[in-house]
Image (spheres, rainbow, N blue to C red):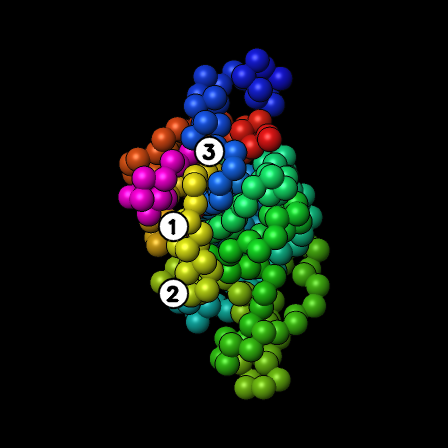
Amino acid sequence: MTTDGVGSDRPHPDMSKARLALGDGGPLVVLTGAGMSAESGVPTFRDAQTGLWARHDPAALATPQAWDRDRDSVWAWYRWREHLVGSAEPNAGHLAIARAARDRSVAVVTQNVDDLHERAGSTGVHHLHGSLFAHRCDGCGTPMEVGPAPTAPVERLVPPGCPGCGGRARPGVVWFGEMLPRQPWDAAVAAISAASAVLVVGTSGLVHPAASLPGIAVDLGIPVVEVNPGPSGLAHGVTVHLRDTAAAVLPALLAA
Ligand code: OAD
């Protein structure tokens, strides 16, 4: 612990400013991206992929075109990611966000398709890009149970057939070029509009429309604090940018 209350060895001159910007009573919105789960061992989108997937570009696999072209490879990739995420644990950052909800209203809006916020104890998480664990038919959209994910990587897997329409199970995530589901988007905009502060963690701010959410807060004059060890993912208007990782700063930043 430093005198600034930071739960790591590194001093943070901006920690007090960031805590002040977040306040301690009003409704808080936490917007998270892939960097949030990096310290749980889930690679970010712009990290090099490891192992079997070193040769695959996630941006090329996460499209309806890839599904039409090579469904079995895409299904195998997503099922393997389910296994990896299922083996990961929430990190100190996820836990700090869940804990903060004991003292104030906290809405979590995430671009992540993992379930680490929920497993840390956050409730009512808004998943803008869907979930790895919610499968549905690619024909009629009916939710489908697909059994446990394989525990070793495979190159190809045939997705189960839909008993209703003969379509195939697909991952319940949003692919590039697809619309975001309406409900979490509307909930995110409503939560930001009613927030007293917004905390943005671990997103490159490159993928729209999610990347436009912090700008809504800025336009409304709501303080925005960003946690990202890299360059700011936000175009403008960030009140404080803490250049460190989620697990390193969130426990002190969100401590009551
Ligand atoms: P990216 O992988 O684009 O960016 C990750 C961000 O996290 C970068 O700005 C890093 O600097 C930061 N970062 C890395 N490690 C961190 C850590 N330990 N703590 C905090 N921050 C850290 O991830 P997203 O912005 O979430 O979309 O990507 C947005 C979307 O692009 C994803 O939801 C996905 C992807 O393609 C779809 O699948 C539709």
* Location of residue 142 in the rendering, given as x and y in whole percent from the top left corner: 56, 78
Which one is nearer the viewer's eye here, 206 or 255? 255
CA separation in Å, label 2 and label 3: 31 Å
Q: Number of labelled discs?
A: 3
Residue at horizontal 61%, vertical 74%?
144
> What residue lies at 52% left-to-right and 34% top-to-bottom?
24
Considering only order in the chain, which callout, 1 or 2, is on the residue closer to the N terminus? 2
Residue interval drawn in magenta: 214-225
In the rendering, which numbered label is found on residue 179?
Answer: 2
Q: Hey, what amino acid is under mark 2? A: Met
Q: Is residue 221 left or right of residue 174?
A: left
Mark 2 and ligand 1: say if the CB distance to the nearest ligand atom is below 8 Å.
no
Q: Is disc 2 placed on a helix, strand or loop?
A: loop
Q: Earlier in the sequence, mark 1 or mark 3?
A: 3
Q: The C terminus is located in which quarter?
A: top right
x then y, percent, for residue 73: 53, 63
Q: Is mark 3 within 8 Å of ligand 1?
A: no
**Mark 1 and mark 3: span between their CA atoms?**
15 Å
Residue at which label 3 appears: 22
Q: Position of residue 174 (x, y in %)?
A: 45, 61
Identify the residue at the far top of this view: 3
Residue at the spot of label 1:
193
Give the class, few, some or many, for how many residues have Cα within 10 Å of label 3's Cα (few <14, many ≥20). Answer: many
Q: Is residue 244 visible?
A: yes
Helix, strand or loop under label 3: helix
Tell me the quarter of the picture where residue 226 sits. Answer: top left
Q: Mark 2 to mark 1: distance in Å?
A: 22 Å
Q: Quadrant of ligand 1?
A: top left
Quick one: 35 or 189, which is closer to the camera? 189
Check if mark 2's residue and mark 3's residue have beta carbons within 8 Å.
no
Q: In the picture shown, does residue 76 fall above or below 206? A: below
Is residue 171 positioned above or below 193 on the image? below
